Amino acid sequence: QVQLVQSGAEVKKPGASVKVSCKASGYTFTSYGISWVRQAPGQGLEWMGWISAYNGNTNYAQKLQGRVTMTTDTSTSTAYMELRSLRSDDTAVYYCAREDSSGESFDYWGQGTLVTVSS
Amino acid sequence: SSELTQDPAVSVALGQTVRITCQGDSLRSYYASWYQQKPGQAPVLVIYGKNNRPSGIPDRFSGSSSGNTASLTITGAQAEDEADYYCNSRDSSGNHRRVFGGGTKLTVL
């Protein structure tokens, strides 16, 4: 069965960086893209960006350009999301989600990783 | 601000039908997908494409689209359908970025 298992919660200081991992299993990793989505406390979902696990192409949300980097390691079927220059409003649960074969929906989601930014 | 607009809250009586809408220019060109999220849980895909349900999603969930509006309909709402619902689609810039609606809190009375 398809599973996306994310790394554990993180606490970071403002200005630091965080790198969240998302390990995939149960399918051919390179056949699907991965999007990252975050949700601030009590708020809605925000799409952060997408990476092709096939060739590493990326497409980032405009507001995060320059601060976010998404990568994959095909040898371990793992996707990574690094966010730099953290601010308090980056405090959120971060999800990875697999894009379905048509690329038009997110059919499987990770369990979420809470990132807290606090001094 | 979101390029996809949803009503913040909707309520429905148990067993009745409710429609949750999502408006945006990009919906004239792209289908919306719909996600259900319960407190403390990851979102779950409930509708994608023209009107497709993933395996395990009850057939009381259906989707439709007209012009710049996509709709999620729950026919015969159950208590367990109480949740937040989000639409998602491509944005209207043509660069294939995606965007979520602000979400609709569904209360089943």
Image (cartoon, coloured by chain):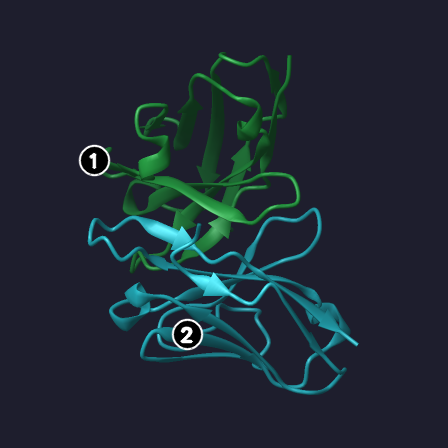
The kind of secondary structure element at disc 2 is strand
Q: Is residue A48 left or right of residue B91?
A: right
Which residue is nearer to you in this view: A24 or A116? A116
Q: Is residue A81 left or right of residue B58?
A: left
Residue beneath disc 2: B70
Q: Is residue B97 left or right of residue A48?
A: left
Cα distance in 3D space between marks 1 and 2: 32 Å
Query: Is A9 rendered above or below residue A48?
Result: above
Q: Do the CB atoms of the residues marked 1 and 2 lie less than 8 Å apart?
A: no
Q: Is residue A53 left or right of residue B16?
A: left
Q: Quadrant of the C terminus of chain A?
A: top right
Report which quarter residue A28 is drawn in.
top left
Specify the label residue A55 is tagged with: 1
Residue reaching furthest right? B109
Residue reaching furthest front? B1
- The three-letter amino acid code for the residue at tag 2 is Ala
Which residue is nearer to you in this view: A92 or B7? B7
Q: Position of residue A79 (x, y in %)?
A: 40, 31
The kind of secondary structure element at disc 1 is loop
Q: Position of residue A59 (x, y in %)?
A: 27, 39
Q: Residue sitting at 48 percent across and 33 percent down?
A: A22
Q: Residue sitting at 34 percent across and 51 percent down?
A: B98
Mark nearest the camera among 1 and 2 is 2
Q: Position of residue A25 (x, y in %)?
A: 46, 40
Q: Residue sitting at 37 percent across and 31 percent down?
A: A64
Q: Position of residue B33 (x, y in %)?
A: 42, 64
- The three-letter amino acid code for the residue at tag 1 is Asn
Q: Colour of chain A?
A: green
Report which quarter residue A105 is drawn in.
bottom left
Q: Residues within 10 Å of mark 1 (few under 14, many from 20)?
A: few
